[in-house]
Amino acid sequence: MADEKQVVLYQIEGSVARVTLNRPEKRNALNEALVAGLKDALQKADHDATVRVVVIAGAGRDFCSGADLASLQKIADGSVAQNVDDARSLMELFASMRQVQVPIVAAVRGKALAGGCGLASACDLVLASADAQFGYPEVKIGFVPAMVMAILRRNVSEKRAFELITRGVEISAEEARQLGFVNQVFPDGSFETEVNNYARGFEKLSKSAVSLTKKLLYQMDSMSFGDALESGVDVNVIARLTEDCQKGVARFLQKE
């Protein structure tokens, strides 16, 4: 069994920060240590100037099967205050993922269920192996996928979101792609290579431009159309003054 201090593995490969959920014997189920480890890993990546993209994957056959049995027992036995603290900790993880400056990519093999499906959807991009399965089975035990609903509602249509969270069914990677929940589906045999190539693609892009784009895109969620345009003006000007943009424009003009 993995040491509690190593339930989340972190390593840098070039400009890619690889974050691995390391509880394969528990199908990478979420517990306090894993959630805390994810927060630490994302904070570390966010403060590393060399990192252009974060890839989150699961060790073993599955991405993440949701909360583990011990965590579910705590939910059943815990006080209101304890349950509030537990739920807020997961909320903080999801919220922090949108604050990380670089793109976060979920590399999903096998099952991504309940909180594990929520973790995948909280990433900026989702890459899935053809054998991957996604679902929110919480309603089967009287639970509600409450926090991840805010994310899912922004990923798919209202009616499909309603269907997924009230029926508790699992869907395939291809169906998830058709819904707009998954960005790309890759063959099982070449999945690691495809994910690596996809992640490496961010090396060729401006880190500052991608960061500004991510921040503005999510800020627009709560804005009116007019406010979104005004914010676009501000970010447009900021981008023009960055070193990346000035060098990029200079290179383009030289080619012309």
Image (cartoon, rainbow, N blue to C red):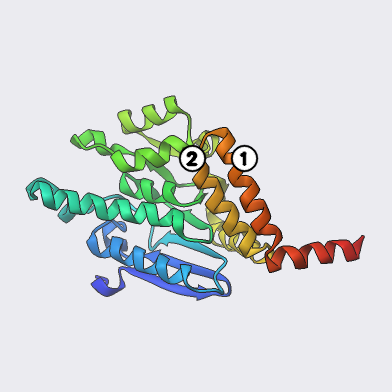
Horizontal relation, residue 197 to residue 95: left or right? right
> Percent from the top left, x then y, of residue 123?
46, 52
Tell me the crowding category of disc 1: few under 14, some 14 to 19, or many 20 or more residues within 10 angstroms, Cα based: few
Above or below 191: residue 218: above
Give the mark nearer the N terminus: 2 vs 1. 2
- 58 or 88, nearer to the observer: 88
Residue at image location 46% in from the left, 74% down from the top: 11
> What residue is pinned by disc 2?
221
Horizontal relation, residue 77 to residue 174: left or right? left
> Percent from the top left, x then y, of residue 154?
46, 37
What amino acid is at disc 1?
Leu
Any part of residue 63 in sight: no
Residue 229 numbered tag: 1
What amino acid is at disc 2?
Asp
* Quadrant hosting residue 41: bottom left
Residue at image location 47% in from the left, 60% down from the top: 100
Horizontal relation, residue 119 to residue 173: left or right? left
